[in-house]
Amino acid sequence: MNKPQYGDPFSQFAAMFQQYQLPGLDVSAILEARRKDVEALAEANQIAFGGMQAIQGKQLDILRRALGDFQTITQQLASSPAKPQVNPTDAVQKALHAALADMQDIAQQTQQAQTEAYAVVSKRMEEAVAELKASVNPPAKT
């Protein structure tokens, strides 16, 4: 089997387009711009994945805390079933407040990850527009 001659796909495209030598077409600039696009998308994906991992960790913490609370309540009920140490109304109210706080925290983490990923892609889009304008309007020769 033949090994690929080039290490990355951008080099392969560059070699392929170099043979055509189209006037006014800067192949290396185009490929460099696409490479930057791919890097920006990879960075945005890493940010999004990090956000998902943070949310997963938060959900595991919520589950552990809920199971611990449930275990404490059941132990208290088992130790004195006639007169429980825990007021069911207070336990439900505490659980609802904790759930609302947890949902707010997860929503904030989600929004932060989305904002950061969007900022990366938005910055690259602005750079791409600037590159396009520069390529369409080359500097005037003096």
Image (spheres, rainbow, N blue to C red):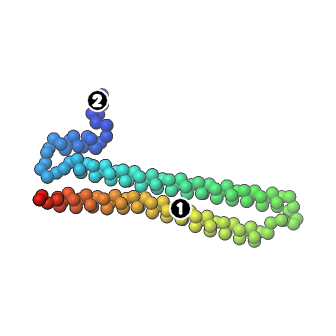
- Residue 68 placement (x, y as % from top left): 72, 56
Residue occupying image coordinates x 14% and y 44%: 20
Residue occupying image coordinates x 81% and y 57%: 75
Nearest to viewer (mark 1 / mark 2): 1
Indicate the quadrant containing the C terminus: top left, top right, bottom left or bottom right: bottom left
> Would you say 133 lies left or right of 118 here?
left
Q: Earlier in the sequence, mark 1 or mark 2?
A: 2
Q: Which mark is residue 1?
A: none
Name the residue that disc number 2 marks. Answer: 2
Give amino acid for label 2: Asn
Q: Residue furthest top?
A: 1
Indicate the quadrant containing the N terminus: top left, top right, bottom left or bottom right: top left
Residue occupying image coordinates x 30% and y 59%: 127
> Would you say 110 lies left or right of 37 here?
right
Classify residue 137 by image quadrant. bottom left
Vertically, is 101 above or below 62? below
Badge 2: how crowded within 10 Å, few (<14), some, or many (20+)?
Answer: few
Give amino acid for label 1: Gln
Q: 117 and 1: which one is in front? A: 117
Tag 1 and tag 2, C-beta contact below 8 Å: no
Name the residue that disc number 1 marks. Answer: 109
Q: Secondary structure at mark 1?
A: helix
C-alpha gap between disc 1 and disc 2: 48 Å
Q: Residue furthest front?
A: 142
Q: How many marks?
A: 2
> Would you say 134 lies left or right of 59 here?
left
Q: Secondary structure at mark 2?
A: loop
- Residue 123 placement (x, y as % from top left): 36, 60
Residue occupying image coordinates x 36% and y 50%: 39
- Residue 36 placement (x, y as % from top left): 32, 51
Q: 137 and 15: which one is in front? A: 137
